[in-house]
Image (tube, rainbow, N blue to C red):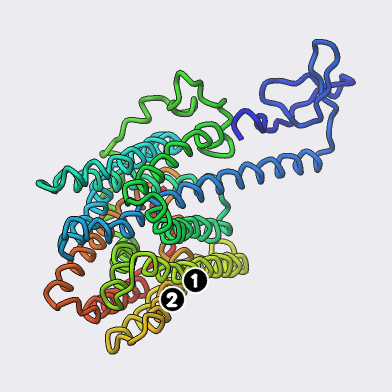
Amino acid sequence: MRGLLGSPVSADTDTTDASTTLDDDDDDGLEAFEGDRLTMAPLETSDAHTLKDTKNAGRKTMMLFLLWTIAWLSALDRVAMSVALLPISEEYNYTDSVKGSISSLFSVGYGVAILPAGLLVAHASPRTVMAFGLALWSVSTIATPVATRLAVDNMAPLLFVRACVGAGESVIMPTIQKLLQSWMQPDEKSLALATIIFGFQCGSITAYLLSPIVIDVFGGWEILFYLYGGTGLFILIPWFFLAQDSPEDQTEPPATTEPLRVSRRASWDESIVSFRDAPWMEFATSRAVWAMMLTGSSTNWVLYNTLAWSPIFYSEQYGIGIRDSAWMSVLPSVSGTLGGFFAGYSADAAIRKLKPNDDNGIANVRKLFQCISQYGPAVAYGFLTMHLPGSPWGAQAFLMLALTLLPFSAAGNESAVQEKAGKRWVGLLYSVISLPAVMFGTLGVYVTGVVLDMSGQNWSYAFGLNAIVMLLGATAFLTMYDSRREFE
């Protein structure tokens, strides 16, 4: 932690002295004070390494916890609208097409900002970029009730605010990808990503469980946005003081008068985004990039539809109220957390058994888990297409299967980005892949609303589209992806 865990270890010692004077960058020993002079008793080399490893492990755990918390909060804010949209729609008589437009504008904002976010994080402090994004989406969440009231005559304010929430959240994954590149070893990244995806799942679960209770207790949906947005602003405090760009970043905590400064190792010139330096042509001609782009697009189609439409599905198909429809959406998210952790742990274990630099072996691991992530849900959605169960619990069983397997992508496509690019371009590569994926997921939310309106709320058509899209995405990754490093 910044200012709490000390400076980088240095092995410089003066063997001619009984004690060694501590320089600014040395902490290879146990500190002892003798009057006004700070001295150190020398440690054995193995003890020094143990001390350094222990400190790095603690800082790594802290960073992972902070990233988990931000992932949790972002899903909380995103899913809040899915739950609140039921009482909002009843109050303002929204059609399914209008509901789809409101839900999809989050993704429009996300998609518009994702490429600039990736370029920015390639040069600027990811810690600072994350703070700006968190502040933007939290303030926009707080503004949502006011924008909704103004949208009685004109939908523009509400759509704009939802787009700003999406734009703020667009920094999350490019920033996380760069931070994990700095903090995690290659055989730790699948589980680390699974842990962060677990944060997203926990945020969804919290929103589904807590939101109906909050609405009932306070007698209105508005309090959701004030509560969740305020929580985001509060989380900025520990992020400022505990987050670091890398294990080697030993800058002091930011002064209260300058809360958002970049690392002192980075000049302001490096913070200026340079389109010229980015490997645009290499991105465009890489088969692996196209594979990740296509499979990411198909995953987003299903993920965005699940977040936007799950409570509405249970309400429209089975006549379940807001509280029960939100509760029905919880179990699939819970099962998804277990699937993600299992995939991350298993993939890392498999990679540890490979020979060093075995690109083919790593590619096969990624392909296996990505195919499970998409072919499995395609089968589940196929069954729902052929026959919608008469009981909501029957439908939930198939949705649980789909959402248990979908997070296997943490060990597939999500981790694949880490192997294709070095630290400089990994965030930008993620943004390049995510831009069309976000647009396609956004299209999926809107198209689902239109299909439901045209078919008289026949959900079989929506699930059939999900199945087809997942089949195509998995096949693209299976046939086109390789794990060879291309972008340094």
Depth check: give the residue in front, 158 or 107.
Answer: 158
Residue at left 11%, top 74%?
454
Quote the CA–CA distance across marks 2 and 1: 6 Å
Say which quarter of the image contains residue 440: bottom left
Q: Label 1's element?
A: helix
Depth check: give the residue in front, 269 or 458.
Answer: 458
Q: Position of residue 54 (x, y in %)?
A: 72, 44
Kindly check if marks 2 and 1 are in contact, taking CB atoms under 8 A apart as contact: yes
Residue at left 39%, top 76%?
399
Say which quarter of the image contains residue 188: bottom right
Residue at left 31%, top 84%?
384
Which label number is shown at residue 335? Answer: 1
Mark 2 neighbour class, 10 Å CA radius: few under 14, some 14 to 19, many 20 or more: many
Q: Is residue 171 left or right of residue 348?
A: left
Residue bearing mark 2:
400
Of the numbered discs 2 and 1, the one sitting upstream in the chain is: 1
Q: Is residue 147 left or right of residue 423?
A: left
Mark 1 neighbour class, 10 Å CA radius: few under 14, some 14 to 19, many 20 or more: some
Q: Label 2's element?
A: helix
Q: Residue furthest bottom?
A: 386
Q: Position of residue 344 (x, y in %)?
A: 54, 65
Depth check: give the residue in front, 400 or 144.
Answer: 144
Q: Residue furthest top?
A: 36
Mark 2 residue type: Met
Position of 283 relative to 339 (above/below): above
Position of 412 relative to 136 (above/below): below
Mark 1 residue type: Ser
Q: Is residue 367 left or right of residue 431?
A: right
Q: Residue furthest left?
A: 153
Could you tell me if residue 297 is visible in this image? no
